Image (cartoon, rainbow, N blue to C red):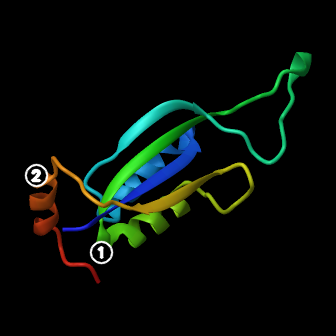
């Protein structure tokens, strides 16, 4: 079975929506890294001239290859990633090799077929 890694960089307050969307689209799990900080095209300066970096979450989703596009589209919609410059991004990468997935593969084999 082949997998894709979907990385979603999103505001922390949208993490749950992204996770729910990924699960509903066929992902079997995710890893969340909180307190990441991101910077957009322009700096946002707050009081005392200090730059404001909004807290982000990095959501790592390992998705079965046939389900990956659906998961990517679902998380982009849930995170509202295309609404403005500062909402976040999602990327999809090929996974050459992955270990420790035997239970995930069993769960995927039990899911309904992809349309």
Q: Which of 113 and 95 is in front in this view?
A: 95
Task: Please give left or right for residue 93 compared with residue 13 in the image.
Answer: left
Q: Mark 1 points at which residue?
A: 66
Image quadrant in which you'd find residue 65: bottom left
Position in image of residue 18 (x %, y %): 46, 51
Name the secondary structure under disc 2. Answer: helix
Query: Which residue sits furthest top?
Result: 48
Task: Please give left or right for residue 109 compared with residue 52 in the image.
Answer: left
Local packing at callout 1 (Cα closer than 10 Å; few below 14, some 14-19, many 20+) is some
Query: Which residue: 72% across, 49% down?
Result: 86
Q: Is residue 57 above or below residue 23?
A: above
Image quadrant in which you'd find residue 14: top right
Query: Which residue: 83% across, 35% down?
Result: 44
Measure the C-alpha gap from mark 1 to mark 2.
18 Å
Position in image of residue 94 (x %, y %): 38, 64
Name the secondary structure under disc 1. Answer: helix
Query: Which residue: 18% across, 49% down?
Result: 99
């Amino acid at each position: 079975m082949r997998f894709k890694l979907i990385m979603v960089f999103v505001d922390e307050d949208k993490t749950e929506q992204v996770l729910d969307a990924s699960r509903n689209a066929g992902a079997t799990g995710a890893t969340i890294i909180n307190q990441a900080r991101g910077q957009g095209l322009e700096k946002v300066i707050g009081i005392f001239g200090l730059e404001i970096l909004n807290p982000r979450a990095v959501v790592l989703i390992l998705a079965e290859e046939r389900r990956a596009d659906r998961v990517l589209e679902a998380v982009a919609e849930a995170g509202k990633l295309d609404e403005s410059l500062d909402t976040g991004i999602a990327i999809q990468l090929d996974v050459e090799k992955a270990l420790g997935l035997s239970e995930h593969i069993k769960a995927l084999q039990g899911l309904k077929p992809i349309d």
